[in-house]
Image (cartoon, coloured by chain):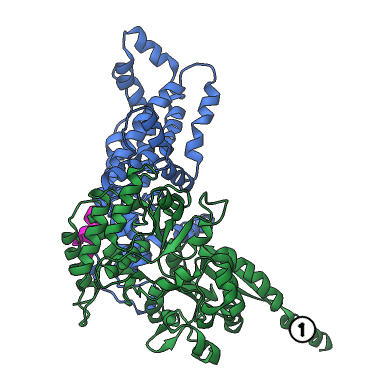
Chain colours: A blue, B green
Amino acid sequence: MVKKDASRWIMILPATIIIAMALFYPVISTVVISFQDRSLFMPHLSRFVGINNYKNILSSQEFWSALKVTIYFTVISVFAEFVIGLFTAILLNQNFKMKTFLRALVILPWAIPTVANGVLWQWIFDANYGALNGLLYQLGIIKDYVNWLGSPFLALNMVIIADVWKNCWFFTIVLLGALQTIPKSYFEAAEVDGAGFWSRLFKVTLPLLRPAIAVSLVLRTSEAFKVFDIIYIMTKGGPANGTQVLSYYVYHKSFEAMKLGEGAAISTIIAVVILAAAIFYTKILMREEVEINA
Amino acid sequence: MRKFLIVVLTFVVILSFAKVTIRVISSDDFAAFRREAIKEFEKLYPDIKVELISVGYNQLYQKIVTTLAVDPGAFDVIDVDCIWTPEFVEMGLLEQIDDRLTEDMKKNILPSVMRILQYKGKTYGLPMFDDVLFFYYNEDLLKKAGILRPPATWDEFVVFSQILQEKGLVKYGSIWGWAQAEGLICYYTMLLSSFGGRFFDENGEPVFNQGGGLKALQWMVDAIYKYKVVDPASINSDDRAMLHALANGDVAFGFNWSFAWTIFNDPEQSTQVGKIKVALVPSGKPGIVSNTSSGSMGLAITRGSKHKDAAWKFIAFLANRKQQKKQSIKYGAMPIWEDLYHDEEILKYHPEFEAMLKQLYYVTDRPSLVRYTEFSRILQIYIQKALTRQMTPKEALDAAVKEVKKLLGK
């Protein structure tokens, strides 16, 4: 018996070590650093400072502004991506010619590296040479070129558009996969019962997609909440900090102001928020067995 | 035993012939020149190999700091902007080089440039060029508008821009690089000093929220919204992105570093080859002829470098008169040697050399602070708040002064 037990432990040891090194060590050490006054240089001189870093962060206006920007970015972009993703998935689940080709095509934007996507949209939104101004001007929708990335709130929304264009296809792919597992007979039965498109959507499709929606929402929400690269490429947090999200603030604190302790404190706050969001989603979307109440 | 000796000997022989590789990180502004110079250097010193990592200026600081924090010997030579010297020295990144300087260097390199890599009386590297923000104007466009000379004051700058716009020659008179980045502080320093302002008073108290400092920001905001002579895209273009508009003939005026000269005259990047000239930066106050912001950079040896002698050879090579002359003639930079300013060859082949030289007499440095990066960021954010009209210039600068006082513990 004892021998068997030992071999069981040995078998899971490699995986445990890898997970511990790759996952637990960075998480725990971030939390530890968040209680120290550690700077990027001379880390050996750091001291334990209790909750000072958290106090500094929570009392700084910049943190709250970054939090607001992040929440706005997350809510709007994930909602838009979900809605577009859901309807394109339903569309691509229909039977029509070129179905396979189109399904392959939607992966393309999602597969573009974020950096390339950022540069692409930066040029589209360019105030003088951008395609968006050119298009809207020639259609007569705008009388004068608009400086899309030139004012704080407008710039934030334009970055969201760039992000939605790239990431809504993630929902399409996941939801399309889930849709294909739903037997056609369900929809046919609902149709026979006289259910229209909307009632079929809300009474059959959405309840059956619930687990897939939960997974993709959790993933995209946590990704959006941690967004950094597209902001770094397109606006660098500007103008006037209007697009500075929390991750960018972490980057600034850790690598520009070189206060690793405060940077780690913000990171820990971000992690807690994402964890709360994940628990919230799973609680609402996965709490019960799926049943169709037709 | 004999076998062992042979092995050891072979190793010694191999090691003594082995090439030393030095890693150099530098801003990409003069990358073409440096790549060319490295080829010559490697021919001259066949035992040294140079690996050049060139990154955009706005990435340079983070790249140096984060890399050296992890591995102090990762770079042997780093490109240091004048504003970083105090901070880098305090962090222990730079090797002192006073003993390596030759008499010639001590005597004949311009003291105003040498200063950028000196801190508390010690020298930490060699400057590579003498750079300031120059005033570039499109002579061709001005002629077409019937304007015979470049503007000498900011009022003229506005009027000339309006004339050019009314005649339909340009959409905006000028474009600037006022995005949230270090370039913004250079432009602000230029305007602040030409309006007769200063950042700190004799007691080290920040005073840029009054006098010339306030006038400068008020002018920036008015130039966009009231006079409408500055392209609003300036708010989100940095000092590199704004170059396209000038090189394309879309604006008539622009302010930039010496490297821009090559871009304006490169047929692949510019439609205005030979049309862009240099004049003194306009003045904002009677009694001030002109004023601009300095922005020289230099190369320094890292304290963690394992090949300090090879690194020094490379720095001294790029600083020598022959290379400096080439950098001037082919790439537009202003040399570091005093005597090269009378060099006939440079005067002959660099058409704007004399105009640029005049500007070097009217220069203001950005403040020298150990916590410069944080100071700069506070200022960038509040200037941007005024430029995007979330705050008035006075409110923005008052708030900035308050935060700078807190930063400096006043």
Residue at image coords 55%, 89%: B104
Quick one: quadrant of the N terminus of chain B? bottom right
Residue type at mark 1: give it: Val
Range covered by the magenta-colored residues: A56-65
Quadrant of the rendered image containing residue B83: bottom left
Quadrant of the rendered image containing residue B179: bottom left
Q: Is residue B141 visible?
A: yes
Q: Where is residue A51 shown, x and y percent of the image?
A: 23, 67
Mark 1 chain: B
Q: Is residue B88 above or below residue B265?
A: below
Q: Which residue is mark 1?
A: B13
Residue at image coords 40%, 11%: A188
Q: Where is residue A150 shown, x and y percent of the image?
A: 31, 47
Question: Of A142 and B146, which appears nearest the observer?
Answer: B146
Q: Where is residue A191 shown, x and y percent of the image?
A: 36, 10
Residue at image coords 27%, 51%: B224
Quick one: quadrant of the C terminus of chain B? bottom left
Q: How many marks?
A: 1
Question: Of A173 and B96, which appears nearest the observer?
Answer: B96
Quadrant of the rendered image containing residue B148: bottom left
Label 1 sits on a secondary structure element that is helix
Q: Is residue A51 visible?
A: no
Residue at image coords 43%, 67%: B61
Question: Of B250 and A97, which appears nearest the observer?
Answer: B250
